[in-house]
Image (cartoon, rainbow, N blue to C red):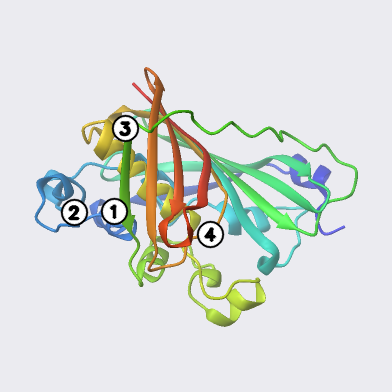
Amino acid sequence: MPIDAAEALAAAPRSREIAWDRKDVLLYHLGIGAGVPATDPRELRYTLESRLHVLPSFATVAGGGAPGVIGALDSPGVDVDLARVLHGGQRLRVHRPVPVSGRATALSRVVAVYDKGKAAVLVLRTEVTDADGPLWTDDAEIYVRGEGGWGGERGPSGRAADPEGEPDAVVERAVREDQALLYRLCGDWNPLHADPDFAARAGFDRPVLHGLCTYGSTLKAVVDTLLDGEVGRVRDYRARFAGVVYPGETLRVCMWRPEAGTVRVTVGAVERADAAVLADTVVRYG
């Protein structure tokens, strides 16, 4: 079996030193669509170094990118074809505001392997700590088609019900034609997002946008719309990647505040009748 769950779970954490600076932060913000309009003061806090605030989802690319999909496939006990792999979901817990520049240690390990029958799901956890203590914890869920059926634990399967009532806010975000080509410079070199031939082998008409690009763009929409642009208020952010986004499409981000400190979110592709892109999406803030 290409995935040996016992070996993957027993493997020691992998440690690496990461570093980032304001240039990396600025590139990330541009990669998720910040800077439109270019002179808007609300956008300049993402694009001008003298006013720079760090959107917490930058943590997913800090230091060249969290191991994510590629890191999970490089884990002991895992030997699968990249073309059969999808990024299934992401959760980020922020322990302190992410600094504009920094050095830290990142420890990554597979913490769960689930058997979904026709697929396997790996959960790769990365814990990042600097000299002052924990900074963030990042969980990437990796969906591997055709690798289930060995009789392992199925794992959580419940899906949250869609929020009820009219959303408290709705915004639309245009995705540039070259958005994936720009975003990949943040560290995710998966050819699925740039190479038409590879995308076809993976079952797509054309290259698709990185799920984490949509993830970051969605968090920015929530922070700008409901949190007055205060990036430091975000505590926890999770989402399931329910469908792909093609560069050039428009995202419709719907937001509900069911209770204090919580925002529920759905994201759809406008041009495809609001086909679901992100689901089970929750932002918790202080």
Mark 1 and mark 4: Cα distance apart in space: 20 Å
Query: Marks 2 and 1: in contact by CB < 8 Å?
Result: yes
Question: Is residue 7 rendered to the left or right of residue 205?
Answer: right
Instruction: Say which element carries label 4.
Output: loop
Cα distance, mark 1 to mark 2? 7 Å
Element type where label 1 sits in the image: helix
Disc 3 to disc 4, how far (Cα)? 30 Å
Residue 177 coordinates in the image, percent (x, y): 36, 72
Q: Earlier in the sequence, mark 1 or mark 3?
A: 1
The local crowd at label 2, few if under 14, some if 14 to 19, many if 20 or more residues have their Cα within 10 Å, is: many
Q: Pick whichever, 267 or 118, lies toward us.
A: 267
Position of the C terminus, as image quadrant, is top left
> Measured along the vertical axis of the image, is residue 152 above or below residue 24?
above
Q: Specify few, some or many for label 4: CA neighbours under 10 Å numbering under 14, 14-19, or 20 or more.
A: many
Quickly name the residue at label 4. Answer: 244
In the displayed structure, does residue 110 sit left or right of residue 196?
right
Where does the image place residue 35, in percent across and percent down from the top left?
20, 56
Inspect the image, locate mark 2, and give the three-letter code of the amino acid beneath it: Thr
Q: Residue at 28% across / 31% down in the picture?
A: 232
Considering depth in this image, is 273 or 219 the residue closer to the camera? 273
- Give residue 47's mark: 2
Secondary structure type for disc 3: loop
Q: Can I make out residue 93 in this image? A: no
Quarter of the image for residue 152 reads top right
| Disc on res. 29 | 1
Residue annotated with mark 3 = 97
Task: Find residue 31 and report its horizontal and vertical position in percent.
Answer: 33, 60
Give the residue at the far right of this rendering.
151
Say which label, 3 or 4, has the lower sequence index.
3
Q: Residue at x 82, y 36 (%)?
A: 153
